[in-house]
Amino acid sequence: MKLKLTILYFSLALIAGCIANRPTERLEFVAPGSYPEGIAFDAVRNVYYVSSARLATIGKVDLQGRYSAVFTDTTLRSTYGMKIHPDGKRLFVCAGDANYSKYSSQQTRNKLCRLIIIDLETGRKMNDIDLAPLVSAPHFPNDLIFDDEQNAYVTDSYANVIYKVDHSGKPSLFSSSDLYKTKGIGLNGIVWHSSGFLLASSGATGALYKVPLNAPNNPHKVVMANFFMNADGLLLNAQDTLTLIQNGGAEKIYKLLSTDDWDSAEIAATTLVADRFSYPSTAALRGSQVWVMNAKFHDLEDSTAVPSKRFAVQRAVFKPIPKKLRR
């Protein structure tokens, strides 16, 4: 009897350990060689829109994991960050030729910087805005966000500036500062805060910047005990809570908390190593849940890797960090 109980307890412990080490919920889909980086969730149509760093295709994934192309144009080279316009009818997409495109050329590599607008009803391109002439520098249009007046703000990770495209489609250079300057992939994820500023991450500096809308050339670093090297996408969950994605070996998602309107912040929660994200890049809200794109860019950095066919959007489940342990 004692032996049976020992075996039972061991079995239960083993099962519990397996459950604890199981990755969080995933929505898998087949899109051979696409390497999606950007993501947006359409609550009206119940689909995710996904970009493609390798093939430039803009696709959609329904909640059953069925992938289909929405828009295809190889002159885009690569598509990255994307957001649904506040009107719910248009998809704005960053397009450039930074590093991974199958269609890269000397004429476009690090030179292309476009904001594409797609009609979600028809899948047709409504506008194609060229941002490259605004700054003489290498270009990597990476992510975007809207404010409450329907202006779009776009990060350029190589020029390390933020562009503004107003509601009429007119582009301009919005924010430029020596504070942003760095080698490699700099400004990346971006969110808008209703108190009148933007927050932008930098992968190369590991910093988070607060950019006042009324003084965009005078940003400052958000004071934090941590630096998030290879920081990527951002998502504002609430006025005081921000999701930050870190890849490049860390492969974790954090929730940051601020009590002073983002002059400073601390880590309030994080995902677990057991969740096994695969080069997470950007995130979208589906209801109150955070869903993250697994871009799998490790493949693209390994010349011996077999191109992936399957990709996944994964739910981020956060483990709170006790206040006394926060840094």
Image: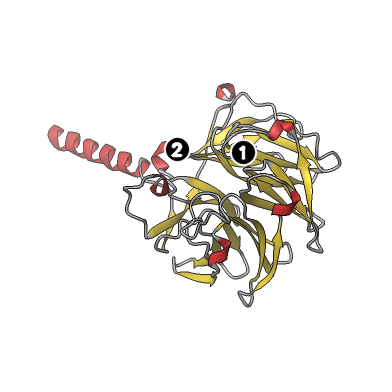
User: If the image is split into quadrants, where does the C terminus sit?
Assistant: top right
Give residue 301's position: percent from left, percent from top: 41, 45
Residue furthest right in the image: 214
Give residue 240's position: percent from left, percent from top: 70, 39
Task: Characterize the local packing of mark 1: few (<14), some (14-19) or many (20 or more) Cα atoms within 10 angstroms.
Answer: many
Q: Secondary structure at mark 1?
A: loop
**Residue 65, above or below 148:** below
Q: What's under tag 1, amino acid-wise? A: Gly
Residue to which mark 2 is pinned: 272
Name which residue lies at 49% across and 40% down: 247
Residue 6, quarter of the rendered image: top left
User: If the image is split into quadrants, where does the N terminus sit?
Assistant: top left
Name which residue lies at 50% across and 68% down: 62
Camera sees residue 259 = no
Horizontal placement of 279 versus 140: left or right?
left
Horizontal placement of 239 versus 79: left or right?
right
Between the C-alphas of marks 1 and 2, the distance is 26 Å
Which of the numbered marks, if any, corresponds to residue 186? 1
Give residue 214's position: percent from left, percent from top: 86, 42
Q: How many marks?
A: 2
Mark 1 or mark 2, earlier in chain: 1
Q: Nearer the viewer, residue 179 or 61?
A: 179
**Residue 256, above or below 147:** above
